[in-house]
Amino acid sequence: EPEVTQTPSHQVTQMGQEVILRCVPISNHLYFYWYRQILGQKVEFLVSFYNNEISEKSEIFDDQFSVERPDGSNFTLKIRSTKLEDSAMYFCASGRLGATYEQYFGPGTRLTVT
Amino acid sequence: GENVEQHPSTLSVQEGDSAVIKCTYSDSASNYFPWYKQELGKRPQLIIDIRSNVGEKKDQRIAVTLNKTAKHFSLHITETQPEDSAVYFCARGKTGANNLFFGTGTRLTVIP
């Protein structure tokens, strides 16, 4: 069964540095999402992406964040200048056209900002 | 509002017993209610979902019920097994919005 994949599994960076988190959604899915989960807390929505543009974003997704689908398979999340409070698990998710509600999550990237 | 309230935060049951987790929401436009299971250090996995046009859905030992009038939905796990131990998250979504709003999670422990 196809799954969403994410790289790296763990990223350690210094405050102020830029990071790019990568995701490969399930191949026939057209809706893409990023969520984050601070340790021990609930999953929080960041952004959704469809038809090569952002369809929704949360208050968390400020100017420091951006997303891109640089080719037909990858979906990336960039944080321009990381802050300590960006430390979290970042999950990518994808969904099929016609079943836009069903979202399947990747294994996550644990981002640690020091 | 956006929040989804989830109770209880922790739940311990004996193997073979049933477990029930309840979520409430306030946005009456919500029409999609999935449940995710997250094992320690792993991804959230979609285990069952329900749309607002039905009141109950069952898949083997797992069932979800929805009361749209009262704005609450519940996950029922029967004949629990140790491998059911995990954190369970409810969520809600609605037509025209792509994002899901998650509950705060329930840590279920099934005691052998």
Image (tube, coloured by chain):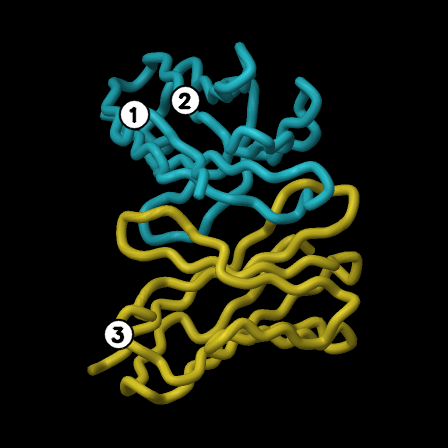
Q: Are marks 3 and 1 in contact (CB under 8 Å)?
A: no
Look at chain B in the picture and name its colour: yellow
Q: Residue visible at 69% across and 58% down?
A: B32
Residue named by callout 1 = A8
Query: Is B84 located above or below residue A45 in the figure?
Result: below
Question: Which residue is under mark 2?
Answer: A22
The amino acid type found where label 1 is placed reads Pro
The subunit letter for the residue under badge 1 reads A
The answer to which of B109 and B77 lies nearer the viewer is: B77
- Tell me which label, 1 or 2, sits earlier in the chain: 1
The residue that disc 3 covers is B82
Q: Is residue A87 left or right of residue B25?
A: left
Which residue is rendered at x = 52% and y = 59% of the image?
Answer: B103
Horizontal arrangement in the rendering, residue B66 relative to residue B86 (left or right) = right
**For the C terminus of chain B, which image quadrant?**
bottom left
Q: Residue furthest left?
A: B112
Callout 3: residue from which chain?
Answer: B
Report x, y in % for residue A72.
56, 15
Mark 3: secondary structure: helix
Q: Are marks 1 and 2 in contact (CB under 8 Å)?
A: yes
